Every structure is written in C-alpha cells, then in structure tokens.
Amino acid sequence: MTFVVQEACVKCKYGDCVDVCPVTCFFETETQLVINPDECIDCNACVPACPVDAIVSEDEATQDYIDINANFDYDDEDKRRESKDDVTHGPSWDAAKA
Ligand code: SF4
Ligand code: SF4
C-alpha cells in the first residue's frame, strides 16, 4: 500500500506534507504534489499535516488519482521537493491555511 494525493491538492499545493515526510518522496507536478509509491514507507505523517485532507491511503483513493501518483516520471529529480518553501503555490493558495 502507499498513500495518494488527491484532488484537494490541485491548485493549492501548500506543501506542509513535504516538510513532514521522512523519506522525501513528494514530487511537484504542474497542478499538485504526488507521492512516489515506490519510496513511500506508509508512515502516515503527511495525512494529518495536509490542511485540506488531500492525502488518503491507496485503498481509499480513486483510481484516477492512484494513476496520477503512480505514473508520474519519478526519474525527474528536479521535481522532488524537500521543503515546503520549494513548492510553487497554486492560484487557490490561501495564506490563512498555510
Ligand atoms: S499539504 Fe498541501 S501540498 Fe501537500 S497534499 Fe496537502 S494540499 Fe497538497
Ligand atoms: S505516508 Fe509517510 S513516507 Fe509516505 S508520503 Fe506520507 S509522509 Fe511520506
């Protein structure tokens, strides 16, 4: 099993999840963050950290978002994010939730 970033992350990308992940397995797409399922250790730390509840376990996720997370090009190390400060916020970013 892994964890999956779903629709609530689209266009917001707060990045709180990035700061708590012990294995740095979040990558940034144009519209959202995604979790590399081959690196995620299922620690659950990111789930309560997300202010919009965008992250769920794979068995609770919808197939389209399982595919979006699984099919990202994880060889593109430039898209790996190690800090929320490195995440480009989306147009719906709300300072009150950050
Ligand atoms: S914490 Fe932010 S960046 Fe991470 S999944 Fe939630 S909305 Fe997306
Ligand atoms: S469950 Fe843990 S290892 Fe997996 S993405 Fe979230 S914080 Fe990272």
Image (cartoon, rainbow, N blue to C red):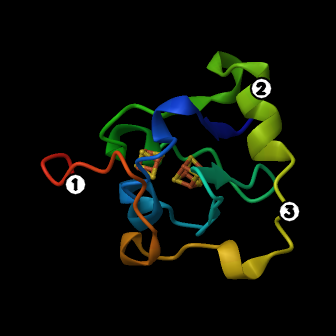
> What residue sits 40% from the left and 48% below the top?
12
Residue 96 is situated, as x and y percent measured from the top left of the image, at: 12, 48
- Name which residue lies at 62% across and 44% down: 42
Residue type at mark 1: give it. Answer: Ala
Q: Earlier in the sequence, mark 1 or mark 2?
A: 2
Q: Is residue 3 left or right of residue 90?
A: right
Q: In which quarter of the image is residue 92?
A: top left
Q: Is mark 1 on a helix, strand or loop?
A: loop
Mark 3 residue's CB less than 8 Å from ligand 2: no
Label 1 neighbour load within 10 Å: few <14, some 14-19, many 20+? few
The residue where tag 1 is placed is 98
Image quadrant assignment for residue 61: top right
In the rendered image, residue 85, in percent from the top left (x then y), is placed at 36, 76
| Residue in view at x 44 percent, y 53 percent | 13
Label 3: which residue?
A: 73
Q: Do the residues labelled 2 and 3 touch (CB within 8 Å)?
A: no
For the N terminus, the quadrant is top right
Q: Mark 2 points at which residue?
A: 64
Disc 3 marks a residue whose amino acid type is Asp
For marks 2 and 3, the one nearer the N-term is: 2
